[in-house]
Image (tube, grey):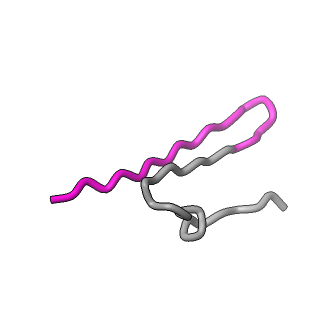
Amino acid sequence: MKNIATFSIIGFDPVTKELGIAVQSKFLGVGAVVRGQKQV
C-alpha cells in the first residue's frame, strides 16, 4: 500500500480576525483541486 501524504494547516489571528489556510502535497498542482475562498 502506497502512502499518500497531503497536509493542511489553518491559522487564525484573533486580533486582526485574519484566517490563513495552506495545503502541502506530494502531487504537483494540488492548488488546482483545493477549494479556495476569497475575502469579500
Q: Is residue 32 left or right of residue 19?
A: left
Q: Is residue 16 magenta?
A: yes
Residue that lies at the very extreme toward the right in this rendered image: 40
Q: Nearer the viewer, residue 37 or 27?
A: 27
For image coordinates 80% across by 58% down, the residue present is: 39
Residue at the spot 67% in from the left edge and 44% down from the top edge: 20
Residue 36 pos. (x, y %): 65, 63
**In the rendered view, would you say 15 is above or below 30?**
above
Is residue 33 found inside the magenta-colored segment of the image? no
Question: Which region is colored magenta?
Answer: 1-19
Q: Indicate the quadrant where residue 16 lies.
A: top right
**For this view, does 5 lie left or right of residue 15?**
left
Count of labels in the image: 0
Q: Quadrant of the C terminus?
A: bottom right
Q: Residue at x 51, y 61 (%)?
A: 28
Task: Return the residue found at the far top.
Answer: 15
Q: Is residue 36 left or right of residue 9?
A: right
* Rendering coords of residue 18 (x, y %): 75, 41
| Residue at 59 percent of width and 69 percent of height | 32
Q: Position of residue 17 (x, y in %)?
A: 77, 39
Q: Quadrant of the N terminus?
A: bottom left
Q: Nearer the viewer, residue 2 or 6?
A: 2
* Residue 8 percent location from the top left of the image: 49, 48
Query: As rendered, which of 40 and 9 lies closer to the eye?
Result: 9
